[in-house]
Amino acid sequence: MKSDSWKPWALLGPSLTAVFFLLVIPVCFVVVYSFWLRAPSGNDIPAFQFGNYAKFFADFFYPSLLIRTIRVALETVLLCLVMGYIPAYFFYRTESSLKPFLMILIMLPFWISFIIRTLSWINILGDSGLINHVFLKIGLIDRPLAMLYNEAAVLMGLLQYLLPFMILNIYVSLDGIDKSLTEAAKSLGCTEWQAFKEVTLPLSLPGVSAGCLLVFVLTCGTYLPPMILGGPGNDMIANLIFKRIVGTLDWPFGSALSTILLGLLGVIVYTYNRYLGISQIFKTLQ
Amino acid sequence: MAKELEQQIDQMVDRYRNGKISRRDFMKYLGIAGAAAGLAGGPFGLARNAFAAKSITFHSWGGSTSEALRKYAFDPFTKATGIEVVDAAFTGMDAFLTQVKASYPPGGEFNLAHLSAVYDYARYTELGFGSVLDESKIPNLKNVIPKMTDTLRAISGGTLSAVPYDYGQTGIAYNSKHISKDKAEKLGASLLWDKDLKGKLGSWGGDFRTNMWYAALHTGQSPNNITDMDAVWNALREQRGMMKKYWASGSELMSLLANGEIYATVAWSGRVAALQKQGHPIGYLAPNNTYSWMEYMYVLKGTDMDVAQKLLNFMLEPDAAIAVALGQNYPPSLDPTKVSMPKDIEKLPAFDPTGKLDGYLFADPKYWNSHQVEWTEKWDRVKAGS
């Protein structure tokens, strides 16, 4: 038994090496950069000081972007959960021969570039987009509705990006539930709703947890939907990081912002694990 | 390369002997230097040099610009010299500078780039990415508008790291179905603060300079010497309340104007020309002291200068320069008093038939670059509504 203990490490070796070199080391670089200084020309000056962090906390403008990001992420999670559970449950229950086709439809958005999918909303929600065009044509409105370049449009962009992640996570969890359990509950007198509430829902929670965590983390790091579909005042923290790193070559401050976001997400994941148990999520996969 | 390494090792030996570095650090340095020499001078170095001798990289805006350059400059150049031009498109000026800064050695993976704006010439030069061109090896440089080369020379201490290639303006584009030409001309820069256009205005969100420039004009100040900064920020705050979209790219700008999402915005003259060619009802306004800029072919440090200079000369051939100008809708840097221009070039917005660019106001790189971080941060706040 003992002589076999190296085998898992040998199997994990390539992945761990890739994670170490492509994730751990770059993150360490980012953390080190966050203590450096930016010269007026845009060059970096090696240093060990906390000025970049002090700058973040000294001015409410920066924390306010982080708070907005968390708020938008929570809204996205809620929307994805409500809109994702129903189709996932449908896939679990249906015996239709169309099920594989419907599953492919869920995966279909991944075949199209995220940027193109996001941009396509402009043709739907814009002043001369599909919805306004039809409403104007049938006389329902006399001027275009402002549906684009606001927070609702950003949420729409995030939803179309992240909904499949939520659906698939919940579906995987539901698919692992023995259907005879709900039948047993019903044979013991439960109504359809009670069987769902007492049996199916609790057993699907690991998938819900995994989906919520994934959607939350991905939302916090995304910058394209706010950039393309957002209006003045809809920027999120990733937009600011992008601007600092690329726009002003202020790598030290951009790195400090990234480290703060990373730390915050780490705390959230840790708390999530403590109270909801990430280990439960992996049970879904088993 | 070997000489540089030798000098560096000598310096390190001196520092070690003088007790400025420890024995451990000295040994560490020798190890690193050995590895570097091995990689650079060994079989890998040979392969790299062999490859380098047969190709040169060129980064540009892609699309019609690259197509025109390939047809009129790169292919004839390769035919004449046997050296291949590996061209690639970048996503934007800032993103490219980030790539150059992140390359190793900094700038070493890149050769020529089609860059914009005088302040970026200053940024690249200050960051140490510049080279020194031997102008005698670029005979076509004599056809370039003198004001453009003089502007660049003034930044890089009398020498050139780039050849100017085209110029343009960031003026005001307006929807002529909803805004009359008379009204636009009467209001000038203040058109961007017209209350009738509330919810139908746009601006370039990614650039503090453009926004501050027009706020300075609106408040009656010189953009290169703003004295009442509060007035500028207050004007931008006021404008934000009327703004529909801060756009992020040229294609987004065109889409917003073409779809009627916005009726007025600051706009790059070439993009306006493209919209006009497509038949959209878009007018172009260049108020007094319109924001002007130039584009140039920058040669990054470490490039084989003989090859680069030969290529630049091909690119400045009138056929090549004019074809690129027509492709991207910006007038070429060639002096129209020395090189005859076709009618289509003369019709382009921002074209100067005198070749003197007398009324063209460029951003003073010293003034704008020295405040870049401070004003970018302030602009981000204003844009976000604080």
Image (cartoon, coloured by chain):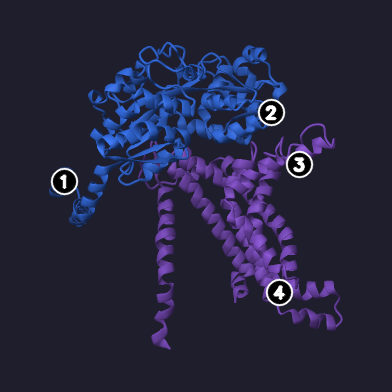
Chain colours: A purple, B blue
Q: Secondary structure at mark 4?
A: helix
Q: Hey, which residue is sitting farthest bottom in the picture?
A: A1
What is the chain identity of the residue bearing mark 2? B
Circles 4 and 3 on the same subunit: yes
Residue A66 in sight = no
In three-dimensional space, the C-alpha distance between marks 2 and 4, rounded to whole angstroms, equals 51 Å
Callout 3 touching callout 2 (CB < 8 Å): no
Kind of residue indicated by mark 2: Lys
Q: Dividing the image into 4 quarters, which one contains the N terminus of chain B?
A: top left
What is the chain identity of the residue bearing mark 1? B
Foreground mark, 2 or 4?
Answer: 2
Q: Which residue is mark 3?
A: A131
Callout 4 touching callout 3 (CB < 8 Å): no
Q: Position of residue B8 (x, y in %)?
A: 18, 45
Circles 1 and 2 on the same subunit: yes
Q: Compare marks 1 and 2 and give the one earlier in the sequence.
A: 1
B77 or A137: nearer the eye? B77
Kind of residue indicated by mark 3: Ile
What is the chain identity of the residue bearing mark 4? A
Q: Which residue is mark 4?
A: A203
Q: Compare marks 4 and 3 and give the one earlier in the sequence.
A: 3
The residue drawn where x is 71% and y is 26% is B198
Q: Is residue B209 left or right of residue A210?
A: left
Q: Secondary structure at mark 2?
A: loop
What is the chain identity of the residue bearing mark 3? A
Residue B2: assigned label: 1
The residue drawn where x is 66% and y is 49% is A72
Q: Which residue is mark 2?
A: B200
Foreground mark, 1 or 3?
Answer: 3
In three-dimensional space, the C-alpha distance between marks 3 and 2, rounded to whole angstroms, equals 19 Å
Kind of residue indicated by mark 1: Ala
